[in-house]
Image (cartoon, rainbow, N blue to C red):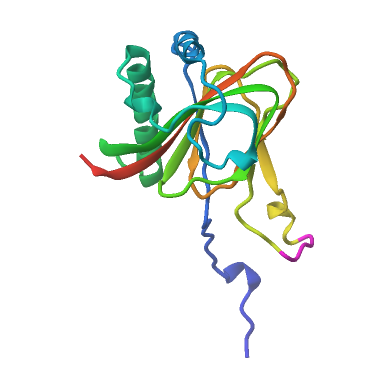
Amino acid sequence: MRSMPVNDIKYERHDIFSAPIFQFENKVLINELKEFILEREISGIESNVAKEIKSNLHESAFDFFQNESQIVLNTRNFVAYCIKKVINDIKDEKFDYELNFSESWYHVGETNSSHDIHNHANCSWCGIYYIQSGDPDSGGQTFFQNPINSIYKDYGTDHIEKSAIAITPSDGLLVIFPSILNHYQALYTGKMKRIVVAFNTRVLGKV
């Protein structure tokens, strides 16, 4: 029997179970948005959600995007534009979409604030918009955990061994990520307040 030359063997590669993270930047909104948020003077966890995993954080109720002020409307419109860009990129199409922001809120983090590991249920895409990232070199990074868990490791699996990636906050950075990703805010030790707006999105279909 004649053996097949190795060079004649055809193969295909399929990258499956991907978890893309998108980053946008908009510094135009952040000064007015910061002023709007700090004027509210919230205390504690107004949302009453998962208090036990939040330390030295003040968190609004989960209806931030329902506020009718112009700066909140502008922020919501910016976020919606970016979500639609994400869906068009993922699906390789050019459509408008009907979105529902099922939850939206903001955090004001004090010195030694942190938010333990969690994910967001009942939505498809989530986002974090860093309004004031705080003092430099003071922690507060957002870590996203690898959704692929391998119980065996050798040279053939070291390309998936990274357990997490860190996003370093910067003023005006918007990070959009799939809701399945476990993530957490590392300990922030700076003295400047750390301010973020966050949201959960449902994509209801094409317009």
Q: Quadrant of residue 71?
A: top left
Residue 93 percent coordinates (x, y): 31, 42
Q: Is residue 155 visible?
A: yes
* 100 or 156, nearer to the observer: 100
Percent of width and height locating residue 122: 41, 49
Q: Is residue 7 left or right of residue 199?
A: right
Whether residue 152 appears in magenta in the rendering, the answer is: yes
Magenta stretch contains residue 187 = no
Task: Tell which of 18 and 72 is nearer to you.
Answer: 72
Q: Position of residue 85 (x, y in %)?
A: 37, 33
Residue nearest the viewer, comparing 24 with 67: 67
Residue 72 in percent (x, y) is at 37, 18
- Farthest residue in the bottom direction? 1
Where 115 falls versus 25 (above or below)? below
Instruction: Look at 51% across and 15% down and name the residue there.
Output: 41
Residue appearing at x 50%, y 12% in the figure: 34
Q: Which residue shows up at 72% across the image and 53% down it? A: 161
Query: Which residue lies at the image location 46% right of the left edge and 38% below the top edge?
Result: 126
Main SS type for the magenta part? loop
* Horizontal side, residue 22 vs residue 53: left or right: left
**Above or below for 99 versus 171:** below
Q: Is residue 94 visible?
A: no
In the image, residue 101 above or below residue 66: below
Which contiguous range is marked in magenta?
151-155
